[in-house]
Image (cartoon, rainbow, N blue to C red):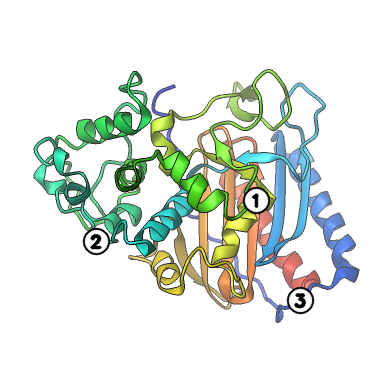
């Protein structure tokens, strides 16, 4: 499947009042669950989307999660709170975190350039890209095209070599965007993945499992569509054709992995997000690297859109992801130790608006029931 684009949509959420946070009021948790369940069921009924899950977490894990709808249209298999979702471009924050860990171990530097780490490409790519740095790649400031012309190219090659061949093929010529200006680039993240592969000698998939998924015990994390094609053991993605939701068990080609092919449960996603929340005792990311990851160039950091929100009492990090068959959104508020998740197994023209509305309601529920 060629050129299915993993898209990033930086959503702007309404502000909401927030009370001091610290201890969960368990007496109100049932009421919060009921309200969220009703909201999701109404969303399914009004929008017609197949299924959706929403959650709130803190540094210790999930505080609230509810689901509604079905795993696959035409079946009665209900989505559960433990199901896996394809998170699309929300993978980028994971890739950036992996790079920070490699930097902390002295294998890379944020100022490492493409040709420094991959010297053999110097004679094959345009000189404009020779000095593009790792940090420019993950903040979308490398002047790199948004996508490869053909993500499925060189399929006979091993994955590491395939990604390197795609890099060479797509950077042969210059584009009109100067290095340093913002251009959202899935290809830039694949190139960052190539640099990680070179200094470790392993695929991005193997490295991120070793450095991130395994230490965080993200046992549901994997790549491509979740579950088994011949079964309905996990949700399927959906596309809308002639006003009908059609299930699809496909994904972008493997080459695009570092830009967005991860799937996992919401609970495991929250384990990763905990790295960015206060009171987190996990030592995978030291303070220096964490600060770099969330420090924006413009309004985009390393895998995160960054804005200031009153309800967040400071900065809020956000990202959305889609491979055109799934749509996920996460907002993270470090100062109040909260993260908000919405994941749908479909991606239509109203997907961003649907997720935005639910995020706003999660913020309200957090303010009302958790303090």
Q: Name the residue furthest bottom.
A: 20
Residue occupied by mark 2:
111
> In this rendering, is residue 180 above or below 117?
below
The picture places residue 151, in percent across and down from the top left corner, at 35, 28
> In this rendering, is residue 229 above or below 268?
above
Q: Residues within 10 Å of mark 2 (few under 14, many from 20)?
A: few
Q: Which corner quadrant holds the C terminus? A: bottom right
Label annotation for residue 371: 3
Q: Residues within 10 Å of mark 3 (few under 14, many from 20)?
A: some
Residue in view at x 62 percent, y 49 percent: 218
Q: Which corner quadrant holds the N terminus? A: top left
Q: How many marks?
A: 3
Q: Residues within 10 Å of mark 1 (few under 14, many from 20)?
A: many
Label annotation for residue 268: 1
State how far apart marks 3 and 1 are (Cα): 23 Å
The picture places residue 290, in percent across and down from the top left corner, at 45, 68
């Amino acid at each position: 499947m060629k050129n299915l684009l993993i898209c990033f949509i930086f959503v702007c959420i309404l502000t909401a009042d927030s009370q001091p946070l610290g201890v969960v009021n368990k007496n109100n948790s049932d009421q919060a669950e009921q309200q969220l369940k009703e909201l999701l069921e109404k969303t399914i009924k009004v929008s017609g989307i197949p299924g959706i899950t929403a959650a709130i977490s803190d540094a210790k894990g999930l505080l609230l999660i509810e689901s509604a709808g079905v795993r696959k249209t035409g079946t009665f298999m209900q989505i559960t709170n433990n199901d896996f979702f394809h998170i699309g471009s929300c993978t980028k924050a994971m890739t950036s975190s992996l790079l920070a860990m490699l930097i902390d171990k002295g294998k890379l530097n944020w100022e490492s350039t493409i040709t420094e780490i991959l010297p053999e490409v110097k004679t094959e790519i345009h000189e404009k890209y020779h000095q593009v740095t790792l940090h420019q790649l993950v903040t979308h400031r490398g002047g790199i095209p948004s996508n490869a012309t053909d993500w499925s190219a060189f399929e006979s090659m091993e994955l590491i070599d395939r990604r390197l061949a795609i890099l060479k093929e797509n950077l042969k010529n210059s584009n009109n965007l100067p290095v340093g200006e913002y251009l959202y680039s899935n290809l830039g993240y694949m190139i960052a993945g190539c640099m990680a592969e070179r200094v470790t000698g392993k695929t991005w998939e193997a490295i991120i499992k070793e450095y991130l998924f395994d230490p965080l015990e993200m046992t549901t994390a994997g790549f491509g569509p979740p579950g088994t094609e011949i079964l309905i053991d996990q949700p399927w993605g959906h596309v809308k054709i002639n006003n009908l939701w059609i299930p699809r068990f496909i994904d972008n080609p493997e080459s695009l992995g570092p830009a967005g092919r991860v799937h996992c449960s919401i609970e495991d996603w929250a384990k990763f997000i905990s790295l960015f929340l206060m009171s987190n005792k996990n030592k995978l990311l030291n303070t220096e690297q964490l600060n770099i990851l969330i420090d924006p160039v413009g309004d985009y950091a390393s895998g995160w859109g960054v804005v200031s929100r009153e309800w967040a009492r400071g900065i809020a990090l956000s990202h959305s992801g889609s491979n055109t068959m799934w749509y996920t959104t996460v907002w993270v508020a470090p100062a109040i130790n909260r993260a908000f998740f919405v994941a749908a197994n479909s991606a239509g023209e109203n997907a961003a608006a649907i997720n935005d509305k639910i995020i706003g309601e999660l913020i309200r529920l957090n303010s009302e029931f958790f303090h």
